[in-house]
Image (cartoon, rainbow, N blue to C red):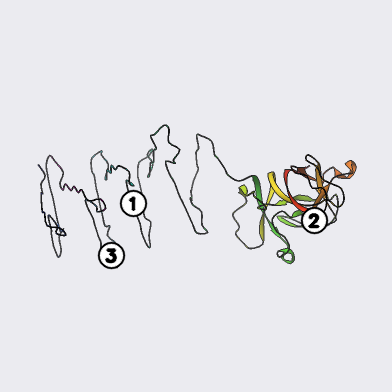
Amino acid sequence: MPALNGETSRPGEAAVKGTSKSGPGVHGISQEFDGVHATTNSPQNAAIAGYNLNAEGTGATLFAENRGRGPGVFVRTGIGAAVDARSEAYEAVHAETNSPNTAAIAAYNLNADSTGAALYADHRGVGPAGFFKGNVIVTGDVLLTGADLAENFSLAETETDEVVPGTVVVLDGIDRVRMSTSAYDSKVAGVVSGAGDYRPGVILDHRDQRAGRYPLALVGKVYCRVDASYAPVGVGDLLTTSDTPGHAMKALDPGRSFGAVIGKAMSALDRGIGLIPILVLLR
């Protein structure tokens, strides 16, 4: 039997109410059953609701300690969230463990036909959705929605307003690039990532968040600014730098192309200047 049992049929009233100035409001102890057992049939209210109303308080709203081998808190639910945690100024969920081989947080989706994630994070600010300090082990595939492998480079301050995604850039020193300005430039470094429908899948060298650093597509698919006034561009054509600042063109001279190729065109451009998808292939 429960150590504490209360019933009421009057709406808005608690079945059991405990008030204390220094000790626990309600303290339930049982040798063979739940210390406190709470059940509700309400469609929107909790079976147990806990509130810490002290604005200066550091105590938890709900504290559970299990000195045996079972969980501190066990939650089973139907269609709602098993745990819904929200905080205005601290972690919504804080987990620690001293176990040598057990995770602080373990998430499992046991439905073999499910397409939902076992662990889902959504960050709508400017910070990362996840931060890991230490090694990360993945036994399955890593699925990235981006299209290219990019790396951050610094850009000359005088060009920060001129360079946009899709711009062709060349090396200009250690960890620094500038907009391309001449044809068949063997210092070509890549294309500024992020134009059109493609976004970088992986960005390397993200340690420095200073302004004036741009992700350059080094491998993969990226939209590139191309000038077809030198020659029409067809699918599969090799592209190199042109005399048009920040634009590529069709490579017509094999001798000058060596070391100056940006990649291959994946779409045609018959005339004029345009933005087309290319496969970055520096060589």
In the image, residue 39 lies in the stretch drawn in magenta: yes
145 w.r.t. 164: above or below: above
Q: Which residue is drawn at 32% across and 48% down?
A: 83
Query: Mark 3 or mark 1, which is nearer to you?
Result: 1
Circle 2 crowding by C-alpha within 10 Å: few under 14, some 14–19, many from 20: many
Residue type of the residue flagged with mark 3: Gly
Q: Position of residue 21 (x, y in %)?
A: 14, 65
Q: How far apart are marks 1 and 2 (CA)?
A: 53 Å
Query: Mark 2 or mark 3, which is nearer to you?
Result: 2
**Residue carrying label 1:** 84
Mark before the other along the chain sequence, 2 or 3: 3
Circle 3 crowding by C-alpha within 10 Å: few under 14, some 14–19, many from 20: few
Query: Mark 1 or mark 2, which is nearer to you?
Result: 1
Q: Where is residue 245 in the image (x, y as percent from the top left)?
A: 81, 58
Given residues 87 and 20, the one toward you in this image is: 87
In the image, residue 277 lies in the stretch drawn in magenta: no
Given residues 170 and 1, the one toward you in this image is: 1
**Residue carrying label 2:** 180
**Residue carrying label 3:** 57
Q: In the picture, which quadrant includes the N terminus?
A: top left
Numbered range of the magenta stretch: 27-44
Task: Tell whether 86 sits left or right of 16.
Answer: right
Q: Distance between the residues labelled 2 and 3?
A: 60 Å
**How would you classify the magenta stretch by its main secondary structure?**
loop
- Give the SS element for disc 1: loop
Q: Where is residue 185 in the image (x, y as percent from the top left)?
A: 83, 51
